[in-house]
Amino acid sequence: PSPSSSSSEYLSAVPTNLLPKLLCLADLREKVRLRGGEKGNAETGETMPQHTLAEHARGLANWSRCLEKGTLPLLAEEEADQLQEKGSKPWPSEPARTMILAAFARLKLPQLSARFPQIHRAAVAAVLEAVIEYERAVAGVEDE
């Protein structure tokens, strides 16, 4: 999908078994908004990530494509600059992104994902689960 693709195109790229978890992220964002803003965890200086449902879907689809090819979704410096110019942030938000990238590299999950479809599916689900856990912690929302 191109950068101007609609959110439904990105959502259709997400495996159906992961849609409920993806919707948890949208629900979490709404809970924080209704609670009185995007405050996040003031003690650590973290703020609630601002990704929309479409951005989560696009990010997850990008991770899935990269893992399928045996690579990690690393950003070149110029890509990071382009994202910043558009007011976007890499997905998932830092520091979760760096931690997930490091763990996947250490475990050689990209190479395994490219060779074994079942590992690919589990790795994509693990990325989404890690993002949900991180965003819940930053927002101060308990598991449901």
Image (tube, rainbow, N blue to C red):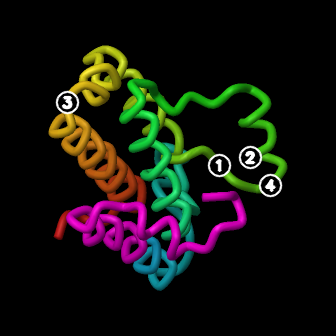
Give the residue displayed 65% in from the left and 68% down from the top: 5
- The CA distance from mark 4 to mark 3 is 36 Å
Q: For numbered disc 3, what is the local secondary structure?
A: loop
Looking at marks 1 and 2 on the same chain, the residue that comes earlier in the sequence is marked by 2
In the image, which residues are magenta?
1-28
Q: Is residue 93 left or right of residue 143?
A: right
The residue that mark 4 highlights is 86
Amino acid type at circle 4 is Lys
Disc number placed over residue 116 in the picture, else none: 3
Amino acid type at circle 2 is Leu
Few, some or many C-alpha atoms within 10 Å of disc 3 (few <14, some 14-19, many ≥20)? few
Location of residue 83 in the rendering, given as x and y in whole percent from the top left corner? 74, 46
- Mark 1 vs 2: CB contact within 8 A: yes
Q: Is residue 77 left or right of residue 30?
A: right
- The CA distance from mark 1 to mark 3 is 30 Å
Q: For numbered disc 1, what is the local secondary structure?
A: loop
Q: Is residue 58 left or right of residue 3?
A: left
Q: Nearer the viewer, mark 3 or mark 2?
A: 3
Disc number placed over residue 89 in the picture, else none: 1
Give the residue displayed 39% in from the left and 25% down from the top: 70
Few, some or many C-alpha atoms within 10 Å of disc 4 (few <14, some 14-19, many ≥20)? few
Q: For numbered disc 4, what is the local secondary structure?
A: loop
Location of residue 108 in the rendering, given as x and y in whole percent from the top left corner? 29, 17
- Mark 4 vs 2: CB contact within 8 A: yes
The residue that mark 2 highlights is 83
Residue 48 in view here = no
- The CA distance from mark 1 to mark 2 is 6 Å
- The CA distance from mark 3 to mark 2 is 32 Å
Give the quadrant of the N terminus: bottom right
Give the residue displayed 52% in from the left and 57% down from the top: 58
Q: Is residue 96 above or below residue 32?
A: above
